[in-house]
Image (cartoon, helix red, strand yellow):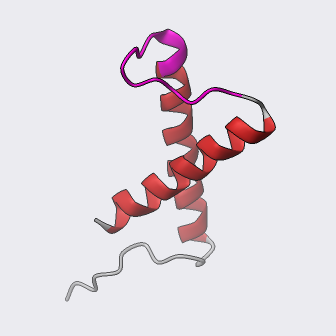
Amino acid sequence: MYHSTVIGGLSIGYTMIGKKLFKMKPADLGRLDLEDSTKLAGTVALSLWTQDMLVKQGIIPANIIKST
């Protein structure tokens, strides 16, 4: 749940940045042609990379449930 929330939040943030700065239309999941698939894959990849960097820098924890 934690990981999906982080990735989902980052994806929404990057979609909003793309829409405002680059006037880019968000990916249409109903159509999902090559252009939309590329947008979606790029957004998720960028979100995963950002999460990895935030964890490595110690800004967010890798996992919120401590396993023993």
Q: How many labels does the image show?
A: 0
Taken as a whole, is the magenta stretch helix, strand or loop?
loop
- Look at the picture and state if 25 lies above or below 6: above
Residue 59: percent from the left, percent from the top?
Answer: 60, 77
Instruction: Please give the range of residues in magenta.
Output: 24-36
Q: Nearer the viewer, residue 58 or 3?
A: 3
- Look at the picture and state if 4 lies above or below 22: below
Q: In this view, does 22 lie to the left or right of 68?
A: right
- Look at the picture and state if 58 lies above or below 45: below
Tell me if residue 62 is in the magenta stretch: no
Q: Which of 22 and 40 is in front in this view?
A: 22
Q: Most extreme residue toward the right, as rendered?
A: 21
> Which corner quadrant of the image does residue 2 belong to?
bottom left
Quadrant in the picture for the N terminus: bottom left
Residue 39: percent from the left, percent from the top?
Answer: 55, 26
> Which corner quadrant of the image does residue 43 belong to?
top right
The residue positioned 75% from the left and 29% from the top of the image is 23
Residue 68: percent from the left, percent from the top?
Answer: 19, 89
Residue 66: percent from the left, percent from the top?
Answer: 28, 86
- Look at the picture and state if 2 lies above or below 46: below
The residue positioned 50% from the left and 19% from the top of the image is 36
The residue positioned 60% from the left and 61% from the top of the image is 53
Q: In this view, does 33 lie to the left or right of 50?
A: left
Q: Most extreme residue toward the left, as rendered?
A: 68
Q: In this view, does 8 lie to the left or right of 65?
A: right
